[in-house]
Image: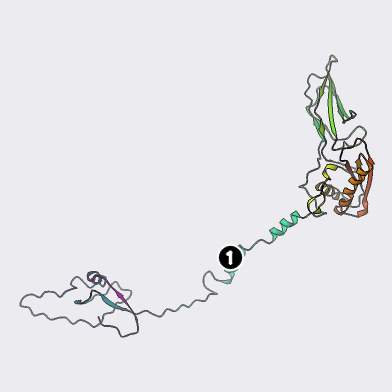
Amino acid sequence: MKRSQETTKTRFITLPLGAALIFLALGPSLGSAATPAKGTKTEKPAVPDSTTLKGGEGGTKFPDMTVTGEDRIRIDFERPELILDLDPKSAPGLERERTLDIVDRGAPDLNAPLLAQSAGQHNAYTGRPWLTMFSTGPVARFRPALSKVERWTLQVADSRGNTVARFNGKGRIPEQITWDGRTLSGDMALPGLTYSYVCEAFDEAGNKRNFLGDAFTVNPYIREEKTGVTLLVPGTELAGKNPGGMPSPILMETASWLNQMERVDTPVVVEALARTRDEAAALAAKVTDALPALLLGPKNRLEVRQNVVPDAPETGVCIVKASS
């Protein structure tokens, strides 16, 4: 093969002779000259100086040739100039609109952190339904297990044995008797005190049987009436310091109830009950220091009263009333 004089890149491919001839499709007679018959004058065919391998065709037939010397063939390849006509602004996947769409899909949510932060902030003027320290149902439920009863009476007594509530009836005793906390004197049962109850039952023959229940205490509770709302806050929930100087959770819940009233200028009365005057004053101060900042409306609508009650709970109790 003729050595090309053109400026091309050259590669040397070393192959066994037989494989090289097959690869170049030289035919079965390549590798050595055919032996002529006796008495026949043979002429060597003219071997072309160069042969071109045409692209896109199944193969190129070479005339007979003899390869001598080293077992390698030199092939010159002509490579066309590589021209990349590529515009990054219009290349697939790099258009401006598609790139922004992809970025927007993975963009951070800026609203979620703000919502999480605002949910933890103690705003004085928002309701806080997650605070459930106040009970809105009955303060106690009684279930005396008595049968064959003609008439019955159930009495609730305080720690001194005084009757504070009474229920009675005829015939079968109800499976459950509820107490809303209202006493015989019209007052509210105070949280922090110990109460007990006893049930007296008479059969048709007049025989009496007593059923003594377990002692119990009253949790903080609220009473909603047409004339207003009453909240009973035990002193145990006001004791100690809160982290960050924030108001007590029970005072925050108290303010939430008061702020839901129709009028924000409704007078609010805070009555502090304790065993001594100093204890009553200290208890009232804990409420008056924090509650005004949590209430809507004018700040002067808060009225504070202090009462000494010998049989009050040990840590005292505050009765918060708002009349509509």
Residue type, label 1: Ile
Q: Which stretch is magenta?
A: 1-17
Position of 207 with respect to 34 (left or right) is: right
Foreground of the two, 259 or 303: 303
Residue at the outermost bottom position = 5
Q: Is 7 one of the magenta-colored residues?
A: yes
Answer with the quarter of the image where residue 196 lies. top right
x and y percent of residue 130 in the render? Answer: 76, 47
Task: Return the residue at label 1.
Answer: 102
What residue lies at 60% left-to-right and 68% top-to-bottom? Answer: 100
Residue 110 inside the magenta-drawn segment: no
Q: Nearer the viewer, residue 158 or 263?
A: 158
Q: Is residue 324 visible?
A: no
Q: Is residue 29 above or below residue 148?
A: below
In the image, is residue 157 above or below residue 219? above
Where on the picture, by quarter, is residue 24? bottom left
Furthest residue in direction left, as rendered? 39
Residue 20 at x, y percent in the picture: 25, 71
Q: Position of residue 16 (x, y in %)?
A: 24, 70
